[in-house]
Amino acid sequence: MQAVMDFIHNPVAPIILAGIIVVLVAAVSFVVRSLKSSRTQNEVPPSTPVVPEASLPQAQESEAEGAQRSRDGPAAQTADHAAPSAGQTSMPEETPTSEIEEERTESASIEVPESIPSRMGRLRARLARSGALGKSLLSLLSRGDLSAADWEEMEDSLLVADLGLEATDELMEALHTRVKVENTSDPQVVRALLREELLKLVDPDMDRSVNLAVRDVDGVQVPATILMVGVNGTGKTTTTGKMARIFRAEGHEVLLGAADTFRAAAAEQLETWGSRVGVDVVRSDREGADPASVAFESVEEGIRRGCDVVMVDTAGRLQTKSALMDELGKVKRVMEKYAPVSEVLLVLDATTGQNGLRQAEVFAEVAGVTGIVLSKLDGSAKGGIVVSVQRTLGVPVKFVGLGEGPDDLAPFDPQSFVDAIVG
């Protein structure tokens, strides 16, 4: 006890006691921290799955792969993310919504051309309403007993309608003879006789089909090739686009060639027509390029794609420019290095009359025209050009255009044409 009292009264006692207390506090604090750390390691949160020991090597392996990906760069990382890791279920790949919407938009933008029977029925009605020649003749025939002046007026109407002098004389002579034989002045009988004689002139027996046969050339299947020719302003490029719609309506695979490299925006115009029905266009990016080269590439591409029809639109060359007409002949010759040209269709403006006939003769000499497409026949008093151009060239009118709409073009039907004239 005396020792304790002596320690307390010792001046250094407080210092020693303070040191002992600090040591004890530090020891207690260390023990408490150790106990908390031990509990944290032994406890597992309920929401966290326990990783089995077998997966530890895999985690180490993926870490090594991550290092390799870092060395390989972004491409390797993208490829690695595409593959599912072991133990994961592979999910089916989904098509991005943007791609689906793009496909739907593209499908919706492609038009379905009107069928041939539908458009022919509609165009027959339009021709009957707009035929100026028919209205003139009907006005004469409705007078009953025709006088000499009436017959002369009928002859003048046929001449004005560009039927041609030879065809008009032939028709009037035949009609006069038959009226005398029938001994009639009945307007309905005369109308029926006029119809029969006009139909003979239009010649319903001419082959107006378009040669779309796919042929075998030296063991290679080549498409039908159509060369479109005509002067500027006749609607040649527009007619080419409308014909492509007809062939698409019939189920043919079509390719267009923009060989009109001289007229500004001709290729763009053709591409617009083609895009509406899902038809591609072969063109040159350089204005003024060699049209023969474009025509050659068009046929070559058509063979490569396995197309049914290749249509080549050419520049509207003036028949007075001999060098340009020679170039048109070159276009045809170059096309025939791959495949014989199936058709050469001359587009004529029905309102040009006898001037159109002179154009037709020159084009026939240079390119060997096989058929005529008459544009702008609606509302025209020049319907007689159908007869005159056929008699001049010896080739049939195969298509007629009766309006500005995309489907206002149809195969020419002699019966409907004559019925529209005589009513």
Image: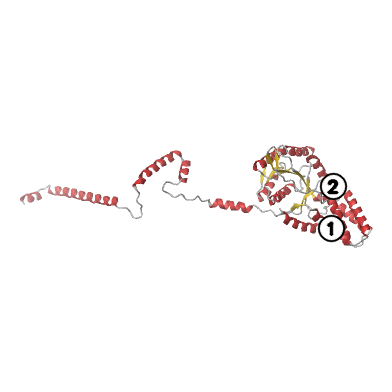
- The amino acid on which the numbered mark 2 sits, given as a three-letter code, is Arg
Which image quarter holds the C terminus?
bottom right
Image quadrant in which you'd find residue 136: bottom right
Q: Secondary structure at mark 1?
A: helix
Q: Nearer the viewer, residue 341 or 321?
A: 341
Can residue 319 be seen from the camera position used here?
no
Disc ID at residue 276: none
- The amino acid on which the numbered mark 1 sits, given as a three-letter code, is Val
Tally of marks: 2
Can residue 135 be seen from the camera position used here?
yes
Q: Position of residue 189 (x, y in %)?
A: 88, 60
Query: How far, Cα to Cα, is label 2 from label 1?
Result: 21 Å
Say whether marks 2 and 1 touch (CB < 8 Å).
Answer: no
Disc ID at residue 391: 2
Seen in the image, is 389 located left or right of residue 94? right
- Residue designated by label 1: 422
